[in-house]
Amino acid sequence: MPISALLSAYRNGTKTATAEITERLVTITKREPELGAFLTVRKEQALNEGKNIDAAQDFSKPLAGIPGAIKDIICTAGERTTAASKILENFVPPYDATVVKKLKAAGYISLGKTNCDEFANGSSTEYSAFQQTKNPQDLTLVPGGSSGGSAAAVASGECVFALGTDTGGSIRQPANFCGVVGLKVTYGRVSRFGVMSYASSFDTVGTFTQSVEDAALVLEVIAGQDEKDSTTLAAPVPKYSATLQQDIAGKKVGLPKEYIDADGLDPKMRKVVINAAEVLKKKGAQIVEISLPLTKYAIPTYYLLVKAEASTNFARYDGIRFGHKTKDSGDLQDMYRKTRAEGFGPEIKRAIMMGTYTLSAGYYDAYYLKAAKVRTLITEEYRKAFEEVDVMLAPVSPMLPFKFGEKSDPLQMYLADIFTVPANIAGICGIAVPTEKIGHLRTGVQLLGPQLGEEKILNFAWHLEQAFQE
Amino acid sequence: MISAAEIRRIAALANLELTPEEVAKFAHELSDILDFFSALQEVNTEGVEPTAQITGLKNITGADTKEDCACSEALLNSAPNPIQKDQIAVKAVFEE
């Protein structure tokens, strides 16, 4: 049920929050053994919160009694938060992330914490240190990553919405793989306070929902400037749900040829994008072919920068103030080295090694600095393109959801992100929206918008959603 | 091809202990990955400033006022080390 319908049902008494939470917990109990979307489920607490809100009979808040789930890289006070890493296996944050605080103030009920790739490093959730999450559309396939747990939880009906993070596609790609809506916001639109960092200049917090309207409603709650996160934007938060249905006639949709004609793009996925373009054209939008020549440099630019930033961010996990500490060690340095060796999984070690190497004296200029300069050029390329078009339409992933163990070569895993990383490089917004099925798998497209262009992409996404529901 | 010695040097800088298998693995993987990424050298970046901040924000400040976080005890309790006089006890940094 969409959020607005659920709120109506609560408000006119046709449904209780207790009933809703109970139903969701039944779904969780039934599906978790095969899905593995949750690392922690809040059974008693969620039921109590449902009962409390029913007793108070106050459903005035924007997400009153709406069941949600939180990616386990986002801190929840007093509740275990692991970033899907052994190094934080028993970590209990003493504070809530700002986004969690805002959701609580809006009256939501958390069903628990969802699985992800360790510290958000990955594109399939296979790098979680704890468990596998399966794609609800087909249990032999990955749900995508890094926010695979959140995507699977929404897709399977275990919750109404979930939070994830998108650093290089980690919301949009799993949303696409699982057949749900995934929103990546403009960098700084949503506070990262209390979100464990992967790459500080790329990380964004966003949403998984069953509908575009639900994405808009949750965004209204979590967006906004935060004094605890100096990278948040001062721009006021509009009522995103109010402009979803605006007419798109006369607006321009860019089709980037380097994406559409990319060698590795599955022709079936290409057709899905063309079909979506046709839909938008029928609604009066103008389809414009655009060129983004720097697209082929996006993956090296992205990965050189994020792994460097990550290596710096992972330095804090040293067995001193929080997290795992090795049992036996010699001196302090020996303690650091063993603690980190024991606590980190293979992709995190790889990230640390690559990042440290490319930041070290003698290599910094050729790798990190070079990538940082190309980032400037890529950002400018997108900024200029958005002077010509309102939004861009593109595939989310070059391939359909793949099988577990299929991308065992790390470089192959990195290349899966080719269509999603540019948005993070440029700090712009994007939304993955499901459109049609290929076989038994619902797939879709992404719409990209300029910085602070969330209203635009939500508007176009709503139109696509409407068309494909008919 | 990145040497095993180089991998060990980098791991030491990052305070990460690696097994001999991991050293060999990373030498191979990093070489492959960085070779692939060397395509970046084709891009002309003369006169281009590197990006550090993607939305153009500068000098966002906060007031330097004292506030009680009300979480000192919880923070200290998070530490996997003994607490002495509200401080985390760690191994010696300097040797005598």
Image (spheres, grey):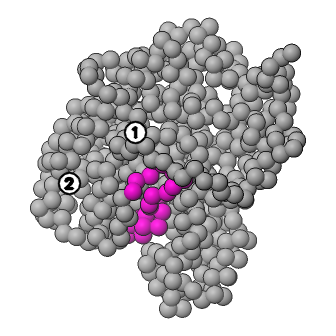
Q: Secondary structure at mark 1?
A: loop
Counting the numbered discs, the total is 2
Q: Amino acid at mark 1?
A: Gln
Q: Position of residue A89 (x, y in %)?
A: 73, 45
Q: Which numbered marker is on residue A328? A: none
Chain for numbered disc 2: A
Residue under label 2 = A390
- Inspect the magenta stretch and tell me whether residue B92 lies in it: no
In terms of secondary structure, where does tag 2 sit?
Answer: loop
Regarding residue B63, the answer to whether it shows in the image is yes
In the picture, measured across the screen, residue A179 lies left or right of residue A160, that is left
What residue span does the magenta drawing correspond to? A206-234
Can you give x and y, in whole percent of width and height, for residue A232 in the image?
Answer: 44, 52
Q: Is residue A28 left or right of residue A59?
A: right
| Residue at the spot 69% in from the left edge and 56% down from the top edge | B69
Residue A431 is drawn in which quadrant?
A: bottom left
> How far across and down, in percent of the image, does residue A129 sit?
66, 41
Q: What whole-number distance in Å separates the C-alpha atoms at marks 2 and 1?
A: 24 Å
Q: Nearer the viewer, mark 2 or mark 1?
A: 1
Q: Vertically, is A147 above or below A297?
A: below
Is A349 displayed left or right of A219 in the figure? right
Give the residue number, with chain letter if any, for mark 1.
B53
